[in-house]
Image (cartoon, helix red, strand yellow):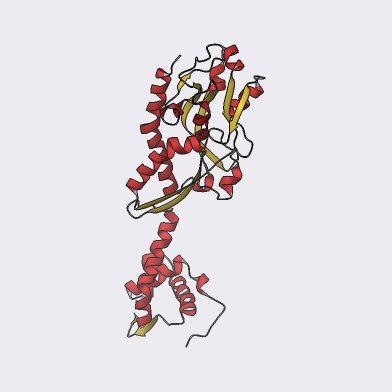
């Protein structure tokens, strides 16, 4: 009988398991030591530690050699599985799309959500066994959204900053002036600023980056209506003389019934109306294979479905 001791299962490590399997397969402590490149005493010490944990002698003398106990034979497959798991752990996580069941949360406001995520869902759904997506509003995004696991990925034109936050640009769009096609568009800066406008102010009272740039430059517009998302704009713009300065890509879907012109501001307005879009994630996901695959699929979706639309819309914007 082997007495209980202070040694427990946490004292089992990969070296002990490798020693055990080598002795089992070689049928000799000497041969096992030679195979592993260690001393016989090291093998004996390792076996003794394992015996105290398992409460079984594991091997018994038989003539000039040793034989494994029935319990040792029963433990061998588990030992091999544990070593394989340790090897996989040391090599990093793996990802098999054929068996993957992904459930992720992406933070995005309605523009990014409707523009980018349907294509992503189609691609990922076709590649994995099961895919579930939860979308939450990003509002004015903060690093805490990623640090606190409120979302796995963030899509925003204004990425939060932090030493543990990683970002990559997905595309470059720009703001244009949308208007009801029945009215005359603004042709000059004065006409644009004299008109009344619809704009988006998120529920956390955060303004669009375009509006913030105008404010920083001392440019004041007459805001008639503020709504919490882009989706609400068409109802107010239709049949009115209001203007809405919004991302040009909305002209492909949400704003397809409206006309648009470039925003008539001073020279250098390109920087003011520029709209980059980034995907942002926490560095703990940097080498996660499932997360890496998701980011790659999002980039592929943008390349196939969005960037071409950007170029076509820039070329076709009415003036």
For the question of whether residue 69 can be seen, the reply is no
Q: Nearer the viewer, residue 21 or 62?
A: 21
- Residue 201 appears in which quarter of the rendering? top right
**Nearest the camera: 265 or 195?**
195
At horizontal 59% and vertical 36% (from top left) the residue drawn is 202
Residue furthest out toward the bottom: 1
User: Residue 243 versus residue 34: which sits nearer the camera?
Assistant: 243
Q: Residue furthest front?
A: 239
Q: Position of residue 59 (x, y in %)?
A: 38, 81
Q: Identify the image quadrant of residue 100.
A: bottom left
Please tell me how many numbered marks the rendered image carries.
0
Q: Is residue 137 above or below residue 88?
A: above
Residue at image location 53% in from the left, 83% down from the top: 4
Of 89 and 12, the residue lying toward us: 89
Q: Image check: 158 left or right of 58?
A: right
**Image coordinates for residue 90, horizontal then vertical, percent:** 44, 56
Q: Position of residue 286 (x, y in %)?
A: 49, 45
Q: Is residue 261 visible?
A: yes
Residue 289 placement (x, y as % from top left) = 42, 48
Residue pictured at 39% horizontal, 44% vertical:
121
Q: In the rendered image of this protein, does residue 73 appear above or below residue 265?
A: below
In the image, residue 181 above or below residue 131: above
């Amino acid at each position: 009988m082997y007495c209980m001791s202070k040694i427990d299962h946490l004292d089992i490590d990969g070296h002990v398991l490798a020693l055990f399997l080598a002795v089992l397969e070689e049928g000799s402590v000497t041969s096992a030591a030679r195979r592993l490149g260690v001393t016989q005493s090291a093998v004996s010490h390792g076996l003794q530690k394992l015996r105290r944990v398992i409460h079984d002698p594991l091997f018994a003398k038989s003539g000039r050699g040793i034989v494994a106990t029935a319990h040792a034979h029963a433990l061998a497959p588990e030992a091999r599985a544990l070593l394989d798991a340790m090897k996989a752990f040391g090599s990093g996580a793996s990802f098999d799309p054929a068996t993957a069941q992904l459930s992720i949360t992406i933070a995005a406001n309605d523009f990014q959500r409707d523009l980018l995520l349907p294509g992503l869902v189609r691609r990922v759904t076709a590649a994995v066994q099961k895919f579930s997506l939860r979308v939450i509003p990003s509002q004015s995004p903060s690093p805490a959204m990623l640090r606190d696991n409120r979302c796995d990925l963030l899509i925003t034109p204004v990425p939060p900053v932090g030493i543990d936050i990683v970002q990559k640009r997905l595309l470059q769009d720009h703001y244009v002036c949308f208007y009801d096609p029945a009215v005359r568009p603004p042709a000059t800066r004065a006409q644009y600023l004299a008109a009344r406008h619809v704009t988006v102010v998120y529920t956390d009272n955060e303004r669009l980056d375009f509006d913030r740039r105008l404010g920083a430059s001392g440019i004041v517009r007459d805001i008639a209506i503020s709504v919490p998302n882009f989706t609400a704009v068409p109802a107010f713009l239709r049949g009115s003389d209001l203007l809405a300065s919004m991302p040009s890509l909305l002209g492909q879907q949400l704003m397809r019934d409206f006309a648009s012109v470039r925003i008539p501001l001073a020279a250098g307005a390109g920087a003011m109306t520029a709209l980059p879009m980034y995907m942002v994630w926490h560095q703990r996901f940097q080498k996660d294979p499932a997360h890496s695959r998701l980011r790659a699929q999002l980039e592929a979706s943008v390349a196939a479905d969005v960037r071409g639309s950007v170029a076509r819309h820039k070329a076709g914007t009415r003036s």
